Amino acid sequence: MSLRPAEGGPPVQQQRSGSMSIITISRGTFSGGMMLADELSTRLGYRCVGREQVVKTASEKYGVSEEKLRTAILKRPSAFKRFTYEREQYLAYIQAVLCEHAKADKMIYHGNAGHFLLKGVPHVLRVRIIAPMELRTKFVMERQQILEHDAVKHIEKIDKERIKWTKFLYGVDWRSPELYDIVFNLETENIHFISTMIEYAVQQEPFKTTPQSQKIMDDLALSSVVRAAIASNPDTRDVDITVRANDGVVRIIGKVKTDEIIEMIQRTAESVPGVKEVKNEVVLNYRYQHIET
């Protein structure tokens, strides 16, 4: 186990704290992440949000099948540009939904990429759970009623896909401990002990929500919703843009094929609730104009 340094007494807390934080739990397949999330939800009184809940909400809101959204956060994108654009759209939808949940604070997210999708928010405690293959295999065998050999193959396949996914999108190995604030091993530490340590951690100053950190969260939520709105518009879904927000002022940067697309991006962004002003810095990509002429 490793924990980012924090001031205070021993890692034991008997009384429930009123502190507010966001906890993301990253784990391998069948590594106890859901059990830990449920335990923490009961202990802290935080809302528990899972990957499937986010996928279901995004599917309903943006009209994309749940299977396509799952693929977007589980498998490495295709080498073909069209499918890469689709993957970026689906990730935009997932991030927008997750950020809307996280904006309300006191949330536990267990699922893929939570620490990536909420990157830069100071009051996010990034937890990683690891478990020995023997324990994970046992979980899979019991849940899916399959043989040990098949369970191991299933786990290894999913693990490899996740490694490829994060390498492709973020250039990192999601298993790397430096991506997390705290890492636990279920081989030596049980769920009760882990939840006790996390309860202590979220009460420390680095992980408490402040007005400044909440502003960062709100800005990220707004920019992600604007990006998702642009991605869901058939006329702008394939654009390569960056969206940033600051107190309701949204800045959009990128290059597109036509002036009409620039105008459509402007109108779409302005239609998003919470947007006060749009600074549209999207320009024409003259490479496309040269090809067309």
Image (cartoon, rainbow, N blue to C red):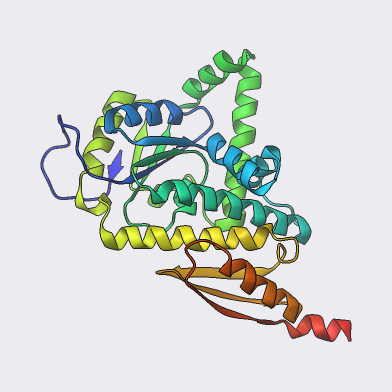
Q: Quadrant of residue 229?
A: bottom right
Q: Residue furthest right?
A: 293
Q: Residue furthest left?
A: 9
Q: Quadrant of the C terminus?
A: bottom right
Work out whether residue 104 or residue 140 is closer to the camera in this orientation and state it: 104
Relative image position of residue 192 (x, y in whole percent) = 29, 24
Residue 131 shows up from this direction:
no
Relative image position of residue 85 (x, y in whole percent) = 71, 59
* Residue at image point 49% right, 53% down: 117
User: Is residue 87 shown above or below 58?
Assistant: below
Relative image position of residue 59 (x, y in whole percent) = 64, 42
Q: Please state if 231 lies on the left or on the right of 131 as rendered.
A: right
Please give the count of numbered marks on the rendered protein.
0
User: Is residue 215 shown above or below 43?
Assistant: below
Q: Please state if 25 lies on the left or on the right of 16 as rendered.
A: right
User: Is residue 174 shown above or below 82?
Assistant: above
Relative image position of residue 105 (x, y in whole percent) = 35, 47
* Residue at image point 61% right, 32% down: 156
Residue 214 shows up from this direction:
yes
User: Is residue 38 shown above or below 233?
Assistant: above
Q: Please state if 110 lies on the left or on the right of 1 as rendered.
A: right
Q: Quadrant of the N terminus?
A: top left
